[in-house]
Image (cartoon, rainbow, N blue to C red):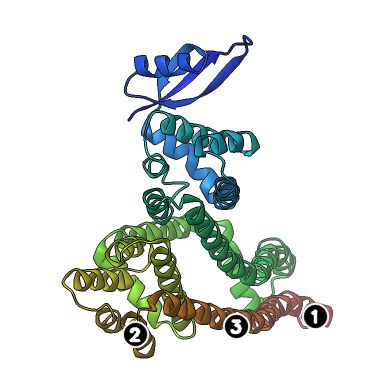
Amino acid sequence: MPRFSYIAIDRNKKRVTGTVTAESPFAARRHLRTKALHPTTIKEVAARQQNKSLMGVFKKSGKVQVAEFTKQLATMLNAGIKLTDALSVLTQQVSDARLRNTITDIRDRLVTGESFADALGDHKNYFDVIYVSMVRVGEVTGTLGNSLTAIAAFMEKRQRVESKMITAMIYPLILIVGCVGVVLFMTVKIIPVIAEQISRTGDELPFLTKAMLGFSELLTSWWVFVIIAGIVAFVWVVKTLLGTERGAFVCDKAMLAVPVFGPLIKQRIIARFASTLSTLLSAGLSMADSLRVVAEVTGNTIMNRAVKQARERILSGADIAKPLRDSGVIDPALAHMVAVGEKSGELETMLKTISDNLESSSDVVIERLSAAMEPLIIVAMAIIIGIIAYATLMPLIKFSAGQF
């Protein structure tokens, strides 16, 4: 149904703004009057504007806020509070205005008779397909509070994994940025001044100094814009190719073949698959529905194909281990563990064990890589800065010694 933004006057003659979902502007006005609000302005909100307003929040802090919202909502529902009342309370506690309007809209749609899952499904920038699917199961089975608790735990676990990756990359990135900054400053500001002073004597500059001076002139000339334009064009072409199924498949396959990082990426993909599938099965989704949801969030086209093939085999009455093994993403040993768990009826537990083991293993690898990268970057920085310093000081030393 369409969404409308409104400006209204409440009982205390105060100005109130918000959004409401209704079939028409007339239905929206009628709904607002039932809440003792006198609407003065009602405008339909375009879908693009809705997505644009929510995207920035989701990228910056939306995941954390949604996790907190989910945990608080689960606590209230498990305490016996009605869903609409719990949402009303949470609208007063959420600090972000756009998320607050989103929760208000969801509550208003519940009042009009829509299901909670359907209302959440229209806010995909906040609530993904996993979230909506688990809520839908919770509504059907009458265990919405437990489903939300599981969702909150799942989101927090995912955030911990992502934060570890980001934390491991912060220090190396700071070193790289610092190195690039020093190199640019010395090649653009220092070397040209020294070269100009020495060139006035009419003597020839050393080869290394000439090379650095040429690099400096390149950075300060219009060629730098040509290079930047070339990089932008290359990135655009790559993104365009990745937008196709074939391009994404080739890129994902190449990423998995990268030494050192390929196995780590593979571990993360399998851990994500196992953790998500285990969570969905524990929430009460059928295997076919769980695999349909997992296929949308794998983040890898090779794994996506394998999961879809596994779902087709499930629908035809076969097992899921063979297509996972044939994909090349999941090792035969792990695929065998999945097959054993499926036959023994302990697939959820087996998947959780696989996920925990892989995440622990990848955490160790990330820590070791981070520890190894830091000294390597420092050594590379020292070499680069040393070369620049040598190219800068060598003419001065020779000039001072009277060799020019």
> Amino acid under label 2?
Ala
> What's the residue at 69%, 71% (across, down)?
202
Q: Secondary structure at mark 1?
A: helix
Query: Where does residue 213 sit, x and y in percent of width and height?
Result: 62, 69
Nearer-N-terminus badge (1/3) = 3
Picture quarter with the N terminus: top left
| Alpha carbon separation for disc pair 3 and 2 | 23 Å
Observer-side mark, 1 or 3, equals 3
Q: Up-down: is 32 above or below 49?
A: above
Find disc 2 in the rendering and name its residue: 335
From the viewer's side, name the closer residue of 2 and 68. 68
Label ID, residue 397? 1
Frontmost of labels 2 and 1 is 2
Total marks shown come to 3
For the residues labelled 1 and 3, the Cα–Cα distance comes to 49 Å
With respect to residue 278, does 130 lie above or below? above
Q: Quadrant of the C terminus?
A: bottom right
Cβ–Cβ below 8 Å for labels 1 and 3?
A: no
Q: In which image quadrant can residue 255 be found?
A: bottom left
The type of residue carrying mark 3 is: Val
Image x and y of residue 207, in percent? 61, 80
In this rendering, does residue 206 appear at all? no
- The residue beneath circle 3 is 364
Q: Report the side of 172 relative to 307 (left or right).
A: right
Residue at the farthest right position? 400
Mark 1 Cα-neighbour bin, 10 Å: few <14, some 14–19, many ≥20? few
Dot 3 or dot 2: first in sequence order is 2
The structure residue drawn at horizontal position 38% and vertical position 35%, both measured from the top left corner, is: 48
Q: What amino acid is labelled 1 in the image? A: Ile
Q: Is residue 201 visible?
A: yes
